[in-house]
Image: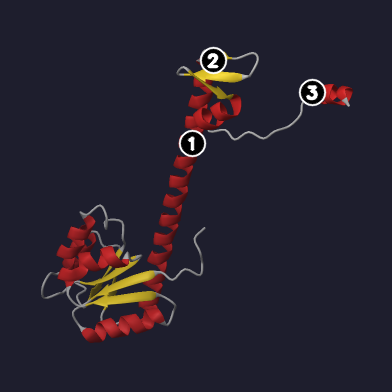
Amino acid sequence: MFDRDYQAKILIIDDQALNLKLASTILKAKGYDTRCISESSQATEAILAYAPDLILLDIMMPDLDGITLCKQLKSNPITNDIPIIFITAKTASETLLSAFEAGGVDFVSKPFQTEELLARVKTHVHIRLLQKNLTDSFQKLEKKQHELLSSQKQVEELKSAMVKICAWTKQIEIDGKWISVEEYFTTHLGIQLTHGVSDSAAKEILKSL
C-alpha cells in the first residue's frame, strides 16, 4: 500500500490568478503539494518537470483551451495516465460531454465550493495512488518472474551440459580453461557458495587428530 504520509502533487492550470490562489490555498491546507501555471501552452513542460498525481485544468483558456490541451496530454504516452479534473463555469451538457470525451475524469464548478473541490480531488488522488501502487507491484512481480526464469534456464543448461571435472584438483574446464568449482558456480550460475564440512570429511579429520 502507498505511503499515507505522501504529499500528493496537484498541478493547477488556470489563467485567472485569483482562481489559482484560491484552489492552491484550499488544497495546501489539506496537505497537498500544489503548483500553479497560468498559461496552458506551458503545461506539458510543467507536467514533465513536476510529475503531478492530478491536474486541475480550466476549460476556458486564452492561449489553448482546456479540452484541446487534455486531448494532447491523453495522446502523449508519458502524460496520458494522469487524471484531469476540469475547472469550469459552464455546466452546459455539451461542454461537459466534450470534456469527458477528451479524457477528463471529473469537473468542479467555479466559483469554488471548498467541500466539493476537496471531495473530488481526494477521490481521484486516492484512485491514482492505488493505480500507481498496483503498477509498481506488477513491475516487481515481473522482475521476480524474470529472475526465476533465468535461474531455471541456468539449471536446465547445467543439467544438459557435459562438464569436464578434474578428479584430482576438482576444477572444471570451461572453454579450454580450468577454473575452480567455486568460481564456476559464481561466474556462470550466479550462485554464492558457503563452506561447510560433510559428515564423511569430519570423520576423516577426527581420525587424523
Q: Residues within 10 Å of mark 1 (few under 14, many from 20)?
A: few
Q: Is residue 13 above or below residue 53?
A: below
Q: Secondary structure at mark 1?
A: helix
Residue 111 x/y as whole percent: 27, 83
Please say if the residues under marks 1 and 3 sit with CB atoms less than 8 Å apart. Answer: no
Residue reaching furthest to the left: 63
Q: Is residue 4 above or below residue 203?
A: below
Between disc 1 and disc 3, whose residue precedes? Answer: 1
Residue 110 visible? The answer is: yes
Front position among marks 2 and 1:
2
Residue in the picture at 39% in, 60% down: 128
In the depicted view, which residue is nearer to us: 43 or 182?
182
Please say if the residues under marks 3 and 2 sit with CB atoms less than 8 Å apart. Answer: no
Q: Secondary structure at mark 3?
A: helix
Q: Which residue is mark 3?
A: 201
Q: Which residue is mark 2?
A: 163
Q: Which residue is mark 1?
A: 147
In the depicted view, which residue is nearer to us: 126 or 88?
126
In the depicted view, which residue is nearer to us: 50 or 13?
50
CA gap between label 2 and label 1 equals 24 Å
Q: Secondary structure at mark 2?
A: loop
Kindly identify the amino acid type of the residue bearing the numbered disc 1. Glu
Q: Is residue 126 above or below residue 16?
A: above
Residue 113 visible? The answer is: no
Q: Is residue 94 above or below residue 62?
A: above
CA gap between label 1 and label 3 equals 35 Å
Q: Is residue 32 left or right of residue 20?
A: right
